[in-house]
Amino acid sequence: MSSALPPLPAKRYFTIGEVAQLCDVKPHVLRYWEQEFTQLRPIKRRGNRRYYQHHEVLMIRRIRELLYEQGFTISGARNRLLDMGHAARAKPAAGAPALPHEGALSIHPASVSLAGEVWLAGDPVDPARLRKELEEIRAILF
C-alpha cells in the first residue's frame, strides 16, 4: 500500500467523503467500484447515504493499489482479489483455531469496535460487551 495514505482512524463507519480522503480517490470512483467489486457493499441509510466499514476501507485501499500502483485492469484486479480470498480461506493463519470456539460468535476478521478494540473471527464474545457495541451502533444510525 502506498505510504502516502493517511492512517485509518478507529471508527466503525466511514462516509463516502471520508473514504475518498483516506484512500485518495474521488467519490464517483468509489460508487463505480461498488458495481465492479462484489466485496464492496456499504450500508445505505437515509437518503441512500453510504457508510463503509473498516474492512471495506482496507479493501478499497487494496483495490486502489492493484489498479493505480500495480497496473491491473478492473477485471484483473477483481480476479486477483478473488484469488487472494480463496488463498486466505484455504490456509488458516498460524496459531489460529481451525473452527470457532463452541458457543462463540464469529466476527469479521479484524473487525474494529467503536471502542477501538479488534475482534477476530473465532474469538469468544462477551454478550454484555456485544450488546453495548450494538447499542452504540444503533445510536449512531438512528
Image (cartoon, rainbow, N blue to C red):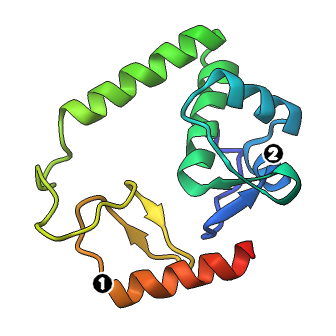
Along the line of sight, which residue is nearer the eye, 72 or 57?
A: 57
Q: Is residue 80 left or right of residue 45?
A: left
Location of residue 124 with respect to 128 vertically, above or below: above
Along the line of sight, which residue is nearer the eye, 36 or 131?
A: 131
**Which corner quadrant holds the C terminus?**
bottom right
Amino acid identity at mark 1: Asp
Location of residue 125 with respect to 41 vertically, above or below: below
Q: Is residue 55 left or right of residue 73?
A: left
Residue 18 lies in quadrant: bottom right
Circle 2 residue: 20
Q: Is disc 2 in contact with disc 1, using a CB cutoff of under 8 Å?
A: no
Amino acid identity at mark 2: Ala
Q: Which mark is residue 110?
A: none
What residue appears at the point 20 percent right and 30 percent down from the top-left corner?
90
Circle 1 residue: 126
**What is the secondary structure assignment of the residue under circle 1?**
loop
